[in-house]
Image (tube, rainbow, N blue to C red):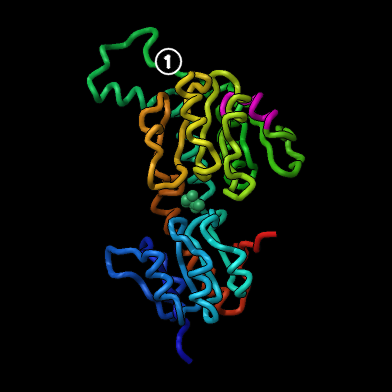
């Protein structure tokens, strides 16, 4: 019997392919230093039983259809699966898996870094120091807003949202959260509007779906408290970036921190000059250990599915 073939769109961290190697699968990788484009994947996928991709790979109907009928699983090395056409996958009986759990704490650390950096405006302060604009300590220099004692509004209370909430408790913050369904947990508020109106700092932890695209627009930002802070480590298109920049420019928002962007890696040029905005290049899960764990989880999912099992991290088809 020939070994199942698995196409991997890029070189993964060391050890990331171990489950596939241990299972004796036939792995197709790009040449060293390269990644596969969408066209490459469409051309190469026929005959493969598994595809390991990530959040930058558009795994649309063209990929799924080119892989059918041999393709049985698409495993994305990410928790987000918004680039995968789950309708096409379900239509062709292709399982979809992601990497929940292994990146929660690392991503929550980064969200908290942005909360602190934005509220204390530390990236602007460092930029001033590096540029020689600092003339010495002054009573009114680089003033931020306190994180301790503030009210944090967590939008979406899944694993990452809860991990951010745990950190906030250590900072003596009051934590509110809003979700689609009541959680029965203290701090639950039953409308996003109420959360936006009550929080000093709002942090987004929801997936990108048709319902959440543009969820935080000009109207929602206007509901946020004067002088509040917005943090997005989820997906860029959830926030209307122009509305965010308007609110930073007008001073309605005190500061913001973004790790994700609409249309990344391209950046809305207004983000580069917006005041009191910290921007990071989508590094929420970027630690050595977490990226290796994510890669191993994806590889293990491929093995589970190809051996006839059902992995815990199966992404359900859309309703
Ligand atoms: C994900 O996994 O979806 C994050 O955005 C990056 O790790």
Residue, far left: 132
Q: Which residue is labeled 1 in the image?
A: 143
Residue at 52%, 74% (x, y): give it.
65
Classify mark 1: helix, strand or loop.
loop
Residue at 42%, 59% (x, y): give it.
292
Residue, far top: 139
The one of 263 and 71 positioned closer to us in this rendering: 263
Can residue 1 be seen in the rendering of this structure?
yes
The secondary structure that dominates the magenta segment is: helix
Query: Which image quadrant is residue 160 in?
Result: top right
Counting other residues with Cα less than 10 Å from the Cα at mark 1, is it few (<14), some (14-19), or many (20 or more)? few
Q: Is 38 placed left or right of 92 in the picture? A: left
Q: Position of residue 309 (x, y in %)?
A: 62, 75
The one of 154 and 239 positioned closer to us in this rendering: 239
Residue 200 on the magenta segment? yes
Q: Is residue 175 above or below residue 205?
A: above
Q: Is residue 207 above or below residue 16?
A: above
Residue 306 on the magenta segment? no
Q: Position of residue 140 (x, y in %)?
A: 39, 9
Q: Magenta region: which residues? A: 193-201
Residue at 42%, 24% (x, y): give it.
276
Can residue 172 be seen in the rendering of this structure?
no
Q: Is residue 174 above or below residue 164?
A: above
Residue, far bottom: 1
Q: Position of residue 73 (x, y in %)?
A: 54, 72
């Amino acid at each position: 019997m020939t070994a199942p073939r698995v196409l991997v769109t890029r070189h993964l961290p060391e050890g990331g392919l171990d489950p596939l190697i241990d299972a004796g699968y036939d792995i197709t990788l790009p040449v060293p230093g390269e990644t596969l484009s969408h066209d490459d994947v469409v051309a190469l996928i026929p005959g493969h039983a598994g595809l390991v991709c990530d959040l930058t790979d558009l795994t649309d109907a063209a990929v799924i259809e080119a892989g059918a009928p041999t393709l049985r699983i698409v495993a994305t090395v990410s928790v987000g699966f918004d680039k995968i056409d789950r309708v096409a996958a379900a239509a062709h009986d292709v399982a979809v898996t992601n990497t929940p759990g292994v990146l929660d704490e690392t991503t929550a650390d980064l969200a908290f870094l942005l909360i602190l950096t934005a509220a204390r405006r530390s990236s602007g302060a460092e930029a001033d120091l590096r540029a020689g604009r600092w003339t010495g300590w002054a009573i009114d220099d680089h003033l931020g807003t306190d994180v301790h004692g503030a009210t944090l509004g967590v939008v979406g209370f899944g694993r990452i949202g809860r991990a951010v909430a745990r950190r906030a408790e250590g900072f003596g913050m009051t934590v509110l959260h809003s979700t689609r369904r009541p959680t029965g947990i203290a701090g639950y508020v039953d409308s996003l509007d109420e959360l936006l109106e009550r929080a000093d700092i709002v942090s987004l932890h929801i997936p990108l779906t048709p319902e959440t695209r543009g969820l935080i627009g000009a109207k929602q930002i206007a509901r946020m408290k004067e002088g509040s802070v917005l943090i997005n480590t989820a997906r860029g298109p959830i926030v209307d970036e122009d509305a965010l920049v308007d609110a930073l420019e007008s001073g309605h928002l005190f500061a913001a921190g973004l790790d994700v962007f609409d249309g990344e890696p391209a950046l809305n040029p207004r983000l580069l000059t917006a005041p009191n905005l910290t921007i990071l290049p989508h590094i929420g899960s970027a630690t050595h250990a977490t990226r290796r764990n994510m890669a191993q989880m994806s590889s293990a999912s491929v093995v589970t599915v190809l051996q006839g099992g059902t992995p815990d991290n199966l992404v359900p088809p859309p309703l």
